[in-house]
Image (cartoon, rainbow, N blue to C red):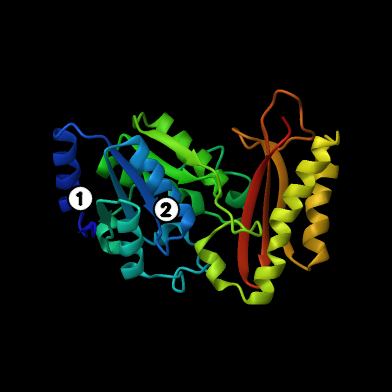
Amino acid sequence: MAPLVLRTVAETAAWAESLRRSGRRLALVPTMGYLHEGHLSLMREGRRRADVVAASIFVNPTQFGPNEDLSRYPRDLEGDLARCASAGVEAVFTPVPAEVYPPGFQTYVDVMQVSQGLCGARRPGHFKGVATVVTKLLCLFKPHVALFGEKDYQQLQVIRALERDLNLGVDIVGMPTVREPDGLAMSSRNAYLSPEERHRALALSRGLSAARELCRNGTRESSALVGAVRRELEAVGLREDYVELVDATSLTPLSAVIPGQAARMLVAAFAGNTRLIDNQPIGD
Ligand code: PAF
């Protein structure tokens, strides 16, 4: 069935309130649209964890830097609504920017620590925009559960922190990255890649797998593991933005994988003008 399309904050608040009053559990999947299998996996998991799933489709201007791809971010609302229907989503909030940021808007959410390194250091203000819009969506829908992909691993940690620090009472669920059969992490931005860039982009997942394999064989030092990822990027001429081994929760850099401490390897690189990110757990 086609989802109910909610365009305003007022109608969304009323819809969510009547749902809660009926005693049903609500799952929310926030997105920027141009939905792919990764988003659909979140929606299907939402259906398993709640009675009703809602999604938002909003290309959030505050999380884009001045020279980023806000104006050309891929959009396909009609196709997205059909994909939402196929995944059992009952309502989709798809506001215009002025509905989310009306004149006089002046309140932002800034998660101080986990936002700092990695993408946060390279994209100033990005996580402030993400944290603000996600907080607004969680306050608007008051869902029981909200689902996000691990592909945006730092974003997931930022959202976990804001939910905890602001006592929002929402179960934040992170779901594994969905990959193309050849290993490329699914992303709406993959649509920007030429066939040749698409082929070179595989170096990110290949590099992460090489580092994991090296670690499985006993190499623990960050320099060697990071080096394994860099070699794959360099072999195909991808421009590195960062490659880092970090603690899986605090995202602080690690000099080595330590048994008993969950670690994660994160990579960001440019294929032409397209910035790609990927990550994998590493170690035990
Ligand atoms: O991951 C995304 O698509 C966005 O960053 C999110 C969480 C929907 C906030 O705009």
Which label's residue is closer to the chain start, 1 or 2? 1
Q: Considering the image in quadrants, where does the N terminus appear?
A: bottom left
The residue wearing badge 2 is 40
Q: What amino acid is at disc 2? A: Leu
Image position, residue 250 (x, y; %): 60, 33
Tell which residue pokes out farthest to the top in this image.
Answer: 260
Image position, residue 113 (x, y; %): 56, 37
Of residues 149 and 127, the one nearer the viewer is: 149
Numbered badge on residue 65: none
Q: What amino acid is at disc 1? A: Thr
Image position, residue 277 (x, y; %): 62, 55
Numbered badge on residue 12: 1
Of residues 199 and 140, the one nearer the viewer is: 199
Q: Considering the image in quadrants, where does the C terminus appear?
A: top right
Q: What secondary structure is found at the residue carrying circle 1?
A: helix
Q: Residues within 10 Å of mark 2 (few under 14, many from 20)?
A: some
The image quadrant that residue 167 belongs to is top left
